[in-house]
Image (cartoon, grey):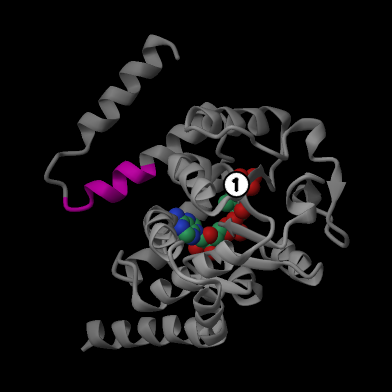
Amino acid sequence: MDSSQNSKKWSISALIPENHPRKESLVIREKIVEGVEEGYVAPQGLIAHGRGECFDYLFGEKTQHFAIEAIRASVALLLLAKYPVISVNGNMAALVPREIVELAREVNAKIEVNLFYRTPERERAIEKILKESGAQEVLGVGEDASATIPELFSERRRVSPRGILIADVVLLALEDGDRTEALVKMGKKVIAIDLNPLSRTARSASITIVDNIIRSFPLLIKYAKEMKKLRKEELEETLKKYDNKAVLSSSLKFLSQRLSEISL
Ligand code: PTJ
């Protein structure tokens, strides 16, 4: 990074006053902007982030009970999986790189880069971030993304034959609906983290965590550490009781109740 970029970063953080009521949100926003400037976040990732911010605002910028329920079921599913994979895009690499690596370690999952706006430069930049965050192996980069998800026409169709292609459980976030639907059609269980409970991804996933990845990744790690101690039957019981439709409906009810309370 040259000195002009360094001074730019310094001036941006100086522009956000310490006591700004929305400092945290602005600092997170800066991480996405930095990712765009450095080329690993797609410019469209800025729009996706803004959409997420809007939903997060409505959810009170807190992890709500329906997300906790989905997080616990996700951990049970990941711990019971034979071959779990965490799929990583640009926004995830910008916001939660260390958490992705730690969760993968806790549940013994592979990490794979999968991009809608795929370019070799972005793949390599995301691989570098994940490796700097402690990942031993990152799948889906270059020649490794040689397999194809059937009936999918975006660049997201390209996956690793050692990763998503053979996975039984895939965890993904900030995703377009097509791939989630295609993965479910292939018989895989999909865990989606998406702040929009109305999105196609949210509605077609096996488990939908309606929460910000910033909060849900640390919680997934926390519950993985705790739930690893449970017996297989107990994990199966958690999954059996889980109802994704009810969780999605609960998130929508929360939104409508919150809006009516505010509008009184
Ligand atoms: O890095 P690439 O090339 O794979 O591209 C990634 C983006 C994000 C650009 C691409 O997948 C995209 O355009 O996504 P969408 O269709 O805009 O969907 C993003 C979804 O994620 C929306 O429903 C947002 O509400 C939600 N979202 C945004 N930020 C967060 C989020 N969900 C959880 N945590 C967030 N921080």
Q: Is residue 205 left or right of residue 155?
A: left
Q: Where is residue 113 in the image (x, y as percent from the top left)?
A: 66, 42
Residue sitting at x 69%, y 43%: 117
Q: Quadrant of residue 174?
A: bottom right
Q: Would residue 63 be visible to someone looking at this image?
A: yes
Q: In which quarter of the image is ligand 1?
A: bottom right
Q: What residue type is labelled 1?
A: Val
Q: Is residue 28 magenta?
A: yes
Q: Quadrant of residue 168?
A: bottom right
Q: Position of residue 63 (x, y in %)?
A: 34, 68
Q: Magenta region's main secondary structure?
A: helix
Q: Mark 1 points at which residue?
A: 88
Q: In this view, does 263 lie to the left or right of 199?
A: left
Whether residue 163 is situated above or below residue 251 in the rendered picture: above
Q: Quadrant of the C terminus?
A: bottom left
Residue sitting at x 32%, y 88%: 257
Q: In this view, does 44 lie to the left or right of 179?
A: left
Q: Position of residue 79 (x, y in %)?
A: 56, 62
Choose between 25 and 132: the one closer to the eye: 132
Residue sitting at x 86%, y 46%: 147
Q: Does the magenta stretch include residue 148?
A: no
Range shown magenta:
21-29
Q: Which residue lies furthest to the top in this view?
A: 3
